[in-house]
Amino acid sequence: MNKRIVMASHPEGWVTEANFRLETAPVPKPAEGEVLVKNHWLSLDPYMRGRMTKQKSYVKGVEVGDVMTGETAGEVVESRHPKFKAGDKVTAPSGWQLYWSGKGELLTKVDDTRAPLSYFLGCLGMPGRTAYFGMKDILQPEAGETVVVSAASGAVGSVVGQLAKEWGCRTVGIAGGKAKCDYVVQELGFDACVDYKAGKLLDDLRAACPKGVDAYFENVGGVILDTMLRLMNVKSRIAICGLISDYNAAEPYGVKMFRSILVNRIKVQGMIVFDWVERYPEANQALLALVTDGRFKYRESVVKGIENAPRGLIGLLKGENFGKQLVRLT
Amino acid sequence: MNKRIVMASHPEGWVTEANFRLETAPVPKPAEGEVLVKNHWLSLDPYMRGRMTKQKSYVKGVEVGDVMTGETAGEVVESRHPKFKAGDKVTAPSGWQLYWSGKGELLTKVDDTRAPLSYFLGCLGMPGRTAYFGMKDILQPEAGETVVVSAASGAVGSVVGQLAKEWGCRTVGIAGGKAKCDYVVQELGFDACVDYKAGKLLDDLRAACPKGVDAYFENVGGVILDTMLRLMNVKSRIAICGLISDYNAAEPYGVKMFRSILVNRIKVQGMIVFDWVERYPEANQALLALVTDGRFKYRESVVKGIENAPRGLIGLLKGENFGKQLVRLT
């Protein structure tokens, strides 16, 4: 039997377990041109909160009763598509379920002899590509510039910072709590990491960025964004990749330091990785080279079992994860 | 004798006449390499509010006792610089005073046989160039796109909108009051103009921009910016040229719809025209051609006498001007 999580209700404010329901259903049968995938890993990502809202977001939202949207990594068990055979490892737009059947064109074959399968949902998947294109096309930091990234220990942030180090930048993270900050500096090799929970964000950021900030990769928003706007240099750049602090808020945060964009001629750009879909191979190749060379550190936060996926997402939205959040399905 | 206005105190909140003081002084004597200019026109511009604050702005602020900063248009009365002779018409960084003497390199010679001298402080001067580079380099609208500009009847806004029409865009202004809106549509030729004082800004903007907004030129900020963020299309652009609604506020406005930048992948860029100084001739030539061809409409709001310059600036900051705000000095 297939197991899957559907959205039981739209959340109001914080997501709760009551917004989800576990269902069972027969394992689907692939039609001609389709492939049946057994999923090993489900990726949990902050964008999922947006899909649960009625409000307009990047793409169509999840409706009540729909399987929750999400990407998985797994194994082909039956193929009626010429490009796939049983045993192939793939990533798939399965949603939150153990089995998925659909058109082969929607699958991406991955080589799990070069990196663990789960990595293709993280540093070698959508989050890694997000970091890559945000850095390469929007922030474009030069060696010697100061790059800051929020949610620095997370799936996107850890790649952003390690790319910044590769490119010769002073690299500063923002994360919640001493354990994450220690990890960001000691394991990921950032030059500094500021704990936003320590209560003196502006002073700590000033100390960590003595020459101001040239490029900021934003995953969080809210007070962190407002504080960062006070540190941005003339002609600096900000990539807006996520605003997770707002996703559960009843009222959006009002950004007070907007004037810094004018005074410092900052370029602020929103980004969604889908806009670079034609260049995914470029990112995949660059990231895989860094991972296989052993120059990339990467950490995962795993919950076990599809029934615990809601708890995993709720924890992620609260910043309780430590590294890329995954659900182990097998 | 020279007459000049100095800053008597830093304003708290709204600027008042008490923040200024009229002084008299001898007419300065030009030294070798210097030029004495008699000013005919003083330009009043929103950026002046920023210079009066202790807060960091684009450039060094005015100190108490300093002559207020500002650009003038006038006539050379005595030259000790080889490039200038008595009778030449020039623009000068004089500040708020009747006479100025300084290095010839700081002057720009203008040809008042091709357009009225005062135009070189407006549509053919800094405001015109600001509009030109904001449109050409930041907003880059294509024919058929919708362009919106706030403070549409002002020195910058009127040029932005007329450039947008020249380039084949649907052009919508935002201005305060029926008289300004009528002027923007009937005289300047915009497709529509929304009165932000009419109390239904969002609905009126939606009606004026049925296909959403591709490019927004921001002079005002605050609620107008927040409302515009709700109308921006995917991959749209916003040039932040001014945030006049904030300049007198004790607390900056909190921008609530920041998330639209993410969801719609908007590019937001702050701009100061000084960053294009090497390309001023390009803008000057393009704008002069449009003015001399009779394809540009332009309106001035004039107060008479240096002693009334403070009143002129206060009115400008409240939106009481109608067109480019000038002080007639002669």
Image (cartoon, coloured by chain):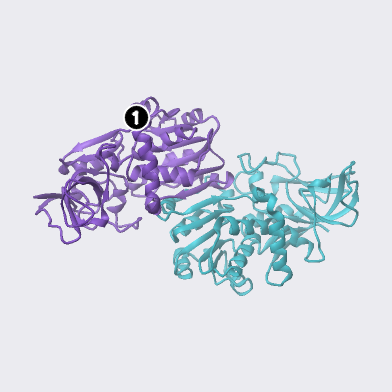
Chain colours: A purple, B cyan
Q: On the picture, is A267 further left or further right than A301?
A: right
Tell me what residue is drawn at x 67 percent, y 40 percent.
B60
Q: Position of residue A187 (x, y in %)?
A: 36, 26
Observer-nearest residue: B280 or A181?
B280
Q: Between residues B210 and B135, which one lies in front from this camera angle?
A: B135
Q: Residue furthest front?
A: A82
Q: Exactly how many numbered labels are in the figure?
A: 1
Residue B250 drawn above or below residue A179:
below
Residue receiving disc 1: A180
Residue at the limit of the structure toward the bottom, as seen here:
B186
Find residue B271 and report its horizontal and vertical position in percent.
Answer: 59, 50
Provide the chain ID for the residue under circle 1. A
Answer with the quarter of the image where residue A182 lies: top left
Q: Is residue A65 left or right of residue B156?
A: left
Classify mark 1: helix, strand or loop.
helix
Side of A234 where A101 appears, left or right: left
Q: Position of residue B25 (x, y in %)?
A: 86, 44
Query: Observer-nearest residue: A235 or B65?
Result: A235
Quadrant of the rendering where the C terminus of chain A is positioned: top left
- The reply to whether residue A245 is visible in this rendering is no
Q: Amino acid at mark 1?
A: Lys
Instruction: Check disc 1: other Cα within 10 Å, few if <14, some if 14-19, many if 20+.
Output: many
Left or right: residue A92 compared with residue B326: left
Q: Position of residue B124 (x, y in %)?
A: 72, 60
- Which of the 4 image quarters holds residue B167? bottom right
Q: Which residue is at 53% across, 34% downward?
A: A143
Residue A326 shows up from this direction: yes
Towards the viewer: B141 or A297: A297
